[in-house]
Each structure stands twice: as structure tokens, then as C-alpha cells.
Image (tube, helix red, strand yellow):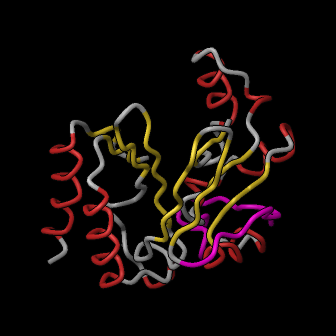
Amino acid sequence: MVLIDSGAGRSSAQIVRNIEELGLNPQNISHLILTHCHIDHIGSAPFFQKKYKIKIVIHELDSEPVETGDSSRTAASWYDTTFPATAIDRKLKGREEILKFGAEKLHCVHTPGHTPGSISVYLDRDGKRVLFGQDIHGPFHKSFGSDIEAWKKSMQALLALDADILCEGHFGIFQPKEKARSYIERYLDEYE
């Protein structure tokens, strides 16, 4: 079992309860894929790593802030908190890597813009493409290493994936395909 992102850190127990309420066992989580290095996505990574011995995966361009506990680049300072230096087990490289977990193939696509090492993850299941595209909405800030032009190219790459379902960590799940597409296009229009 794989977990994509881990919340801001103060909700670790609630995340575990949510997993259990779905009838799943958190002991079966083998990997945590972090879509980028911000505290609201990585906050519970140390908890899951310590309690469940899971392996943490992130793109190499966002690994250093996690490994050093950089309060600026992890945006922990924005939330008036800290993030402890946390070991990374696997650093993704390049434009795309495919991770296999049993019969499932998770495509980790480098989608820089919000941060240099932002990724989006997708899988194809039961004839549908499910896309986990976090922080499509931004924000963009110099301290994050944001690059709006790179983000625009990344959003075009996400549109080209033609996802049936978009799971966006802040604003929910968008389906069918037309709603997923229009969500991404709305932000492209906003930042023109």
C-alpha cells in the first residue's frame, strides 16, 4: 500500500483513523510518496516513517529541504512551526519514473513550478486515469523556488495526460474528465 502525501503533521492520528475506516491497515503502507517539500504535504512523514517503517520517496530537487528541515523551503515558517530533518529513502530523478507496487504502476511525473521538485502521480485502473496533482493552484513564491513559466508547461503536461479523475490535495476530487480538465485550465487562465 502506498500513501501520497501525509498532511501538515498535526493530523497524523486522524490520517491513521481515516485509513482504518476504509478497512485498510496502516501497517501495510510500504511507501510514502511526497509530491513536494511543503509542510502541509510532508508534516506527518516523520511519524509514518518512525511508527510504520515506511520508505519516503520525493523528487531529488525537493529532497534537500526535507533532509535538512529547512523551515523556509518547507514553508514550515508560514505555519509558525518546524519540520525535523528527515531521511529520504528514494530520490526520483528526471522527467518521469514508474514505480511498481504489485500489479500497480504509479507514474511519477516531474511537474516543476510550485517548487523545483514538484511531482504529480497517476495510475490507470479499471479503464480510468487517476491523477494526483497537488497544488495546481500555487501559490508561487521566491522562497519556494517557484517558477511560473515552468508551472505553465507542467500544467500543459497534466492536461495532455487526459485524466478521468483529478485528486487535488487542497480542493478535493474532480470528475469526470471535463471537470478535471477545467480545474487545471481555470488556473492557467488566472495566471496568464
Question: What segment carries the magenta color?
Answer: 72-94
Q: Quadrant of residue 136?
A: bottom left
- In the rendered structure, does residue 118 fall within the stretch colored magenta? no
Up the image or down, 64 lies above or below 185; here it is: below
Type of secondary structure dominating the magenta stretch: loop
Q: Quadrant of residue 87?
A: bottom right
Residue 158 lies, in percent from the top left, at 32, 62
Q: Position of residue 45 (x, y in %)?
A: 72, 50
**Quadrant housing the C terminus:** bottom left
Position of 139 relative to 10 (above/below)? below
For residue 83: magenta? yes
Q: Does residue 177 appear to the left or right of 8 in the view shown?
A: left
Up/down of 84 relative to 70, above or below:
above
Total tally of numbered discs in the picture? 0
The quadrant in which the N terminus is found is top right
* 140 left or right, relative to 39: left
Task: Work out whether residue 180 or residue 161 is closer to the camera in this orientation and state it.
Answer: 161
Residue 127 lies in quadrant: top left
Counting from the top left corner in percent of width and height, residue 121 is at: 49, 54
How far across and down, in percent of the image, does residue 2 sit? Answer: 65, 41
Decide if residue 129 is on the left or right side of residue 145.
left
